Amino acid sequence: MSKSSPIDQLENRTLADKLFRFVVEAAPNAMILVDHDRLITMVNKSAEELFGYAREDLIGKPIECLVPNRFQQGHSEHVREFLSAPQTRAMGAGRELYGRRRDGTEVPIEIGLNPIETPDGFFTLASIIDITERKHADERFRLAVEAAPNAMLMVGADRRITLVNRKAEDLFGYSREDFIGRPIEDIVPERFRQKHPEFVQGFLAKPKTRAMGAGRELFGRRKDGTEMPIEIGLNPIETAEGLVTLASIIDISERKRAEAAHEQLAAIVEFSDDAIIGKTIDGVITSWNFGAERLFGYTADAAIGRNIAMIIPERCMEAELSLREQIRESHSVSHFETVRKRKDGTEIEVSVTLSPIRSTLGEITGASSIARDITEIKRRDAELKRSNAELEQFAYVASHDLQEPLRMVANYTELLAQRYQGKLDEKADKYIHYASDGARRMQRLVADLLAYSRVGSQGRPLVKVRSSDVLQGVLESIDRSIHESGASIEFGPLPDVLADEVQLRQLFQNLIGNAIKFRSDAPPRVVVKAIPNGDRWLFSVTDNGIGMEMQYADRIFQMFQRLNERGKYDGSGIGLAISKRIVERHAGSIWIESTPGAGTSFYFTLKPAEGGGI
Amino acid sequence: MTRPIRILLVEDNQADADLTMETLEAGKLRLQIKLAIDGAEAIDYLRGAARDSKTELPDLILLDLNLPKKDGRQVLREIKAEELLRRIPVVILTSSDAEQDILKSYDLGANCYVTKPVGLSAFQSIVRCVENFWFTVVKLP
């Protein structure tokens, strides 16, 4: 036998025997001495208590009486193995061991085996610990780990994984079986692997609960090789097996994405041309972007913490307070035009859009305010209005003042014709004719120009108008032309619209007049309809006239543009230009659809009368 | 033989004045037409006639609105403010068809408002109409 027991070294064998028995008896663990034939030769009190047998009932029994039936077959095998190379060791490495009590119940145990060689033969002393409590604790720990909301991995000092939970399986794509026993570096991206053992050593040298990789960005590697950003908490745990590390891992991909989105949004806000300001419900400024710095002249440092009143002129304060009231009632305010004060005291016109800011609990805690400088827009707007008004005034004055001398030319050439027709030579007659014809044409153009300029300058406010009444009125006034041409005009129900009645009348008159004027050989048939189209009424005036090529569709709405040669159809070509101007003054649009020989449809849109609906 | 009908024509445009006079005179009535070429002359003439027993006041005034020196509207206001002048019918004969001119003229007491039409024959026919209406239909003061 290569192994010897210290008992051999005692000189007095009886004393040694007594001492041995005493030690065994006093041991806190259950102790059982088994002889070479696997018969129990000695048990202590703890063993009696553990297995529920009286000492006498065990002595001389084979050890298998304490082994559950399901393990008995393998047991004699294990004993043979042990005896072939006896050494002090734990029994059943890697296996869970159970003992059988007298009442047949099982108890989880741990067994240490010590071979003892004596002059009386070879014995094995088994030291047995009831690990029921530890098992319970283990189970509680396992359940706690399993139930944790994060991925949990337990790693031994050898950096191998000994425990994982469900979340860890989900996160890394390894099954539990696949995980256990793997080196932890398997879930570390390759580029960090080399340094990792060093970090582990560092941690184990000073084990304390802490976050891993302070200041560094951490990544985990899934089984499929993909990576994810993670956060890791490390907890050192002292166990029977030594120091282990419990790592709690959170996938922060979502958070990173949200952070990236947040940063992007923050950059957009920061560098927006508009001033974007956050403030509390009482007006204390909480954020202030570059746009605000540029627009108002205060830096963010100077503005944050102060009250927004610093950029509001005294006279606008009342409006500001009423806006705040709206925010409190959780209303947003869009494009409110007002005046703000710069740091240097100058004032600027701004368009302000306000939205409530809510806390995570949904309570309104402040407002975001987007202010756009509209000084320039306002100035251009005013300039455009003035220039339009001037242009209109010019057109009006020019055409009005042209009429006077023109009337003279026209009247006197006509008087010449009246008095001297046939009294001079033929040429004189012809010249007089040209002169008066030219003057008449010019009179017509000037009159049309005047009418065109009056659409803008002499327009009345837009009010609720019954378009069917207006159309009816038009039909009565052009009754003669309808009768003479044999035209039939049909119209269904027409809506109330927002219009200048005089101009709407002119519009209908122009379009229906046009339909009758450009008739084909067939008697003209004109249909007027209106259908809802978005937030407008879409009117159509359709005829069965000569139609036209669509390539001229835009030209016909320009001033003094005619598609047909002079003389064939009367008119200077102002009617449709005036029609377009009227529709545009009503914030609508007008267009045409036509087929040569088949007829023409004019379409135009008008706003419904207030409360009239669509 | 009855006395000719006296007309005061206030018109700064000589061509229009000639045309109007020619058309009026081409009618059957015996007319005596006095032309004033601006508002001030018209008022002076009327006031003079009112004072001077040798000069007769006109039976009818044809008044243009846009006149130099004294505007037609002012002339009308002054005529209607004077005891001796205000019964003389005033016909506004102008190229303006602006609504504000029409309303203003009636407010100031114009007896009728006529817009000079475009075209010679239309003009002639209007002038004849005016002549016919005021001198054969209407009883003058």
Image (cartoon, coloured by chain):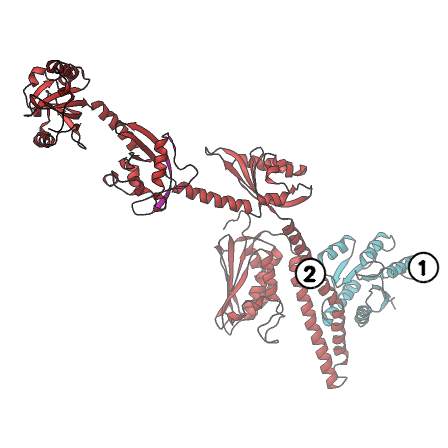
Q: Provide residue A385's location: percent of width, then percent of height.
A: 66, 55
| Chain of the residue under label 2 | A
> Is residue A228 one of those drawn in magenta?
yes
Q: Residue at x 67, y 65 (%)?
A: A449
Front residue of A349 and A392: A349
Is there any visible trace of residue B45 in the rendered image?
yes
Q: How many labels does the image show?
A: 2
Measured as percent of width and height from the top left, residue A119 is found at 7, 21
Q: A441 above or below A38?
A: below
In the figure, the shade used to draw chain A is red
Q: Which of A378 and A553 is in front in this view?
A: A378
Q: In this rendering, would B92 be left or right of A475? A: right
Residue A416's label in the rendered image is none
Residue bearing mark 1? B53
Crowd class of label 1 (few under 14; some 14 to 19; many from 20; radius 10 Å): few
Task: Tell me the residue at 80%/64% (across/down).
Answer: B135
Q: Where is residue A218 in the image (x, y as percent from the top left)?
A: 39, 41
Could you say whether the residue bearing mark 2 is in a helix, strand or loop?
helix
**Residue type at the position of mark 2:** Leu
Instruction: Check residue A91 for magenta coloring.
Output: no
Crowdedness near tag 2: few (<14), some (14–19) or many (≥20) residues, C-alpha within 10 Å: some
What segment is highlighted magenta in the picture? A207-232
Mark 2 or mark 1, whichever is nearer to me: 2
Q: Which chain letter goes with mark 1?
A: B
The cyan-coloured chain is labelled B
* Residue on which the image places disc 2: A391
